Amino acid sequence: MSKRELIDTGSDKRYVRRDDDGRFEQSVDVSRSLSADKRHRAKAVAKPGEGDRGDHNAKH
């Protein structure tokens, strides 16, 4: 499983995952709700780069 990377195109921001060949496997638009999620404390724990599979560590 590859980590997500943030791509800023200038007009929008997207989180993408790449497959083993470097091609885009999954793409998610960073909307206002995802931006708001980062400002709140998390209850669950997820590994770095895996924020879409749970919450980030509550210690951030």
Image: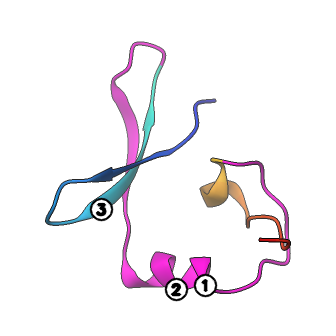
| Magenta part of the chain | 20-48
Q: Is residue 44 left or right of residue 21?
A: right
Q: Are marks 1 and 2 in contact (CB under 8 Å)?
A: yes
Label 3 and label 2: CA atoms lie apart by: 14 Å
Q: Is residue 44 left or right of residue 27?
A: right
Query: Is 33 or 7 nearer to us in this picture?
Result: 7
Q: Position of residue 54 (x, y in %)?
A: 73, 62
Q: Is residue 21 magenta?
A: yes
Residue type at tag 1: Arg
Identify the mark nearer the N-term, 3 or 2. Answer: 3
Q: Are marks 3 and 2 in contact (CB under 8 Å)?
A: no
Identify the mark nearer the N-term, 1 or 3. Answer: 3
Circle 2 is placed at which residue position? 36
Q: Secondary structure at mark 1?
A: loop
Query: Is 36 or 54 nearer to us in this picture?
Result: 36
**Residue found farthest to the front:** 60
